[in-house]
Image (cartoon, rainbow, N blue to C red):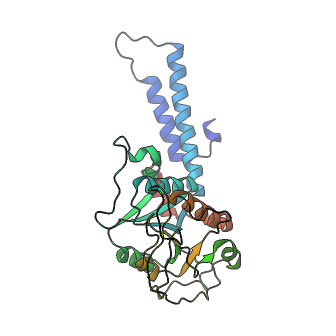
Amino acid sequence: LLLLLPLPLFQLGAMTTTSTIMRTSPLPQGYAASSSTVAEEETIGMMDLRRLRRAESILKARVGANLTVVLEGAVNDRNQDAVLRTCEGLGIQNVCIISPPKGMKQQPKSNRYTSSHVTRSASHYLSIGWYTNIADCARELNSQGYEIWVTDLSPASQNLLTLLPSLQESSSSSTSSAGASSSPRQRGGYDDDGHDDDDDDGDGGGGGAKRHHNYAKTVFPEKLAVVFGSEIAGASPEIKSWSHRLVHYPMFGFTESLNLGVAAGIVLATILSSKPDLRGSLSRTETIALRSQW
């Protein structure tokens, strides 16, 4: 049965060794072996094998450096953790978190709240970069060749449902993220009214002078960073000044805003559905490192 499992040989060898140790190690004094004990050991061994098989299948479908999520200034830990859980569930490996300004972080309403309640340990499987200011994060993304899309509801924002089908597949000869500091943009956030109706909502407006931007690119970027702003103010004028596009998912009801985690899930799922080749894009180096980490 072991030979039939689609696992790397070194993992099969490790599991076989583990199984042998479990069977041959001496029992504590006064402890008699029984059929139920042997059955339990076999069950544990098969559970470990199933977990390894699942980890390998997840690695094969993981989204690598081609897509990175940036969370800017989330003030509510529940919202931030919900986005992390969404990213992990969608198979997105890389996340950048820009801390909000000092004093802006909201305290949990219940002292029983812990991060694990929302993330379900999802963050343990992600590669997270932490930043204290926007410029450092944006410069690093630019230096790595990312095209930056900022989620925003201003008039200058492009509808994802019409934008994605219009973009051709990326190619190394036609895609370039050089000249990363694109023109600053205009006001936006999750809501047009600039109000935060609920601490857990991902709504909000924002402030900023009206600017211009060039949307001439017709190729989907080889490396894409998608930015989600804070619940209260949306994406800041500073992060929008580094963007190549403002994008949004259209609303079809009376509700004008969504929870930050829900908005992130819809936008990211839309991008992944439109560009399925993003899946399975981990490099060999990333795959080996994550296998060891997990």
The residue at the far left in this view is: 102
Indicate the position of residue 234 as horizontal and vertical percent values: 47, 70
Q: Quadrant of residue 106?
A: bottom left
- Location of the N terminus by quadrant is top right
Q: Residue at 50% of width from left, 12% of height from top? A: 34
Q: Let me know if residue 230 appears in the view.
A: yes
Q: In which image quadrant can residue 102 be found?
A: bottom left
Write the residue at 52% across / 31% down: 45
Question: Where is 283 relative to 116, above or below?
Answer: below
Please determine whether, in this image, residue 128 is positioned above or below residue 46: below
Please name whichever residue, 282 or 25, is drawn nearer the observer in this view of the structure. Answer: 282
Q: Residue at x 50, y 46 (%)?
A: 10
Compared with 31, 213 (above or below) is below
Residue 250 percent location from the top left of the image: 64, 69
Q: Position of residue 58 (x, y in %)?
A: 57, 52
Compared across the picture, whether 68 is left or right of 255 comes to left
Camera-nearest residue between 81 and 122: 81
Image spot of residue 27 (x, y percent): 39, 17
The total of numbered circles placed on residues is 0
Q: Which is nearer the eye, 139 or 76?
A: 76
Q: Is residue 242 visible?
A: no
Q: Is residue 31 above or below residue 173?
A: above
Q: Is residue 263 left or right of residue 112?
A: right
